[in-house]
Image (cartoon, grey):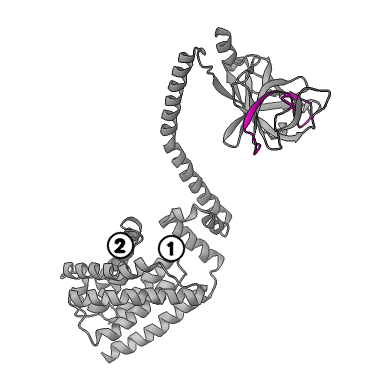
Amino acid sequence: MHRELRLANRLAIFFVGISVLLLSLPLSGPVASFKFALQYLIEPELYQGSIGLERLSELPSSLKKLLQADIQNRSLTDQIKMEPVLESEIESLKTENDRLRSEMDLGKRISFSFAWARVVKRSPADWYQDFIISIGKNKGIDPNDPVFAVNGRSLAAIGRVVEVRSNTAVVQLLTSDISAVDSFIVSQSSHTHGAFNGLVQGLAAPDLQISYLPVQAPLKEGDKVYTSPNSASFPPSIFIGTVAKVYPVDPFLIFKSADIRPALSPSEINEVLVGRGIRKTEISR
Amino acid sequence: MKLIKGAAIFFFGLVGEWIFSRYLSFHGLNPQILLILTIGVAAFNGTPEAMVFGFFWGLCWDALSLNLFGARALALTLVAYGLGLVRRQVDMVTPGAQAIVAVIATVLYRMLLGFIYLIFSGQFLWLGWTIFLLEPVYNGIFCFILAILRPNSYFSSSRRGSILS
């Protein structure tokens, strides 16, 4: 018994010493990396939040990339799992929309498909006017097809097809000075909430201009502008940009105007989505 | 052979702790498998062996979790040492005695962990009154059941001698 007690005392001193040493000393980079990697294997959820991401910053770049890829993979897998739910929700909304349209005698809903394209050529002289995309007749593109770009998680209208070749097409940007699109602006004024129709025109400059807004429209910076249901080329309610500057009302004019900052500047656009079939559907309608 | 059995107990202890903490946690309450097994080792195999198991279990669990590195190792080592002192006064082999020891050891273990966090990270580790009050009871019941179910296990078969002896 005494032997056991002596051994226990020695072990206690030894283990307590090691534990206190481990608790006192900061972990070196490789040890910390090894610990984080082990933790990730056991509890990957701990790395999903901001604290987890901070911890990842301490890891060597190769391991960090691997773990970040896994985190992204988990997040995307979760999103994919939600896809059937969203699809069924969309289908149910489409059905409801069709039923209401038919009851209101509004005709069939405009539907079209998308085709991805890359921007293959742009000219510095016509930076705000147009660019050439990598698809044309070969993918069923027609003149006046609307062109969009992905802005975060939503679509933004950026222009329309004006010339179609066999494998390429020319896209005229909304910023072009010969471009105009019917639109509406959603006022977020604290006094009045409402939407006002206007015409967005290009200026061959970074910003657009919206005109023909009612004088009483309570606009302010940050208000959002969308394509109008009356637009000939674009489907309704596609984001165009936000109000950057509201001009004072000119007493000689009967409308108000404002500068619009486009959702995406031409410099930010590398890939686009071309909406196919909208013209055909409209003509048949 | 004893070393292999010891390694198996060590491994299954860690797996058990992981499974219970991850999948069988009830409102944050789960039995402290490593603590219960440390009590078992102390009861049947002696204090030194319980200290070795407790230290390395704690160290491994610290490495696998976001705990302060070395905190559980220190807490389990000290609990095992304390159990050694109690073992000389109380017969810890019966399930009832082990359950009571588990209740008291859980309270001490939580307090120790709290103070270790207070000293080394500046904040007392407090998981709330529910866990503080219910965890010892839960551990006691779990320890009692485990003590009843293990008559022919590693613990009782190795009463004749310790791994360290």
Mark 2 sits on what residue?
B16
Please name whichever residue, A32 or A72, is drawn nearer the observer in this view of the structure: A72
Image quarter in which the N terminus of chain A is found = bottom left
Looking at the image, the residue that sits furthest to the bottom is A2
* Same chain, labels 2 and 1: yes
Disc 2 to disc 1, C-alpha distance: 15 Å
Vertical order, A182 against B108 (above or below): above
Q: Can residue A169 be seen in this view?
A: no
Residue A210 in the image: state x and y as whole percent. Answer: 73, 26
Decide whether residue A190 is among the magenta residues: yes
Q: Give the range drawn in magenta.
A: A189-215
A100 left or right of A259 in image: left
**Residue flagged by tag 1: what amino acid is it?**
Ser
Secondary element at tag 1: loop
Which chain's residue wears label 1? B
- Residue B86 is left or right of residue A56, and the answer is left
Is B33 above or below relative to B115? above
Circle 1 residue: B65
Residue B53: x percent and y percent? 33, 74
Q: What amino acid does circle 2 point to?
A: Gly
Is residue A81 visible in this depiction of the protein? yes
Q: Considering only vertical position in the picture, is B46 above or below A201?
A: below
Image quarter hosting the C terminus of chain A: top right
Left or right: A156, with A209 as reference point? left
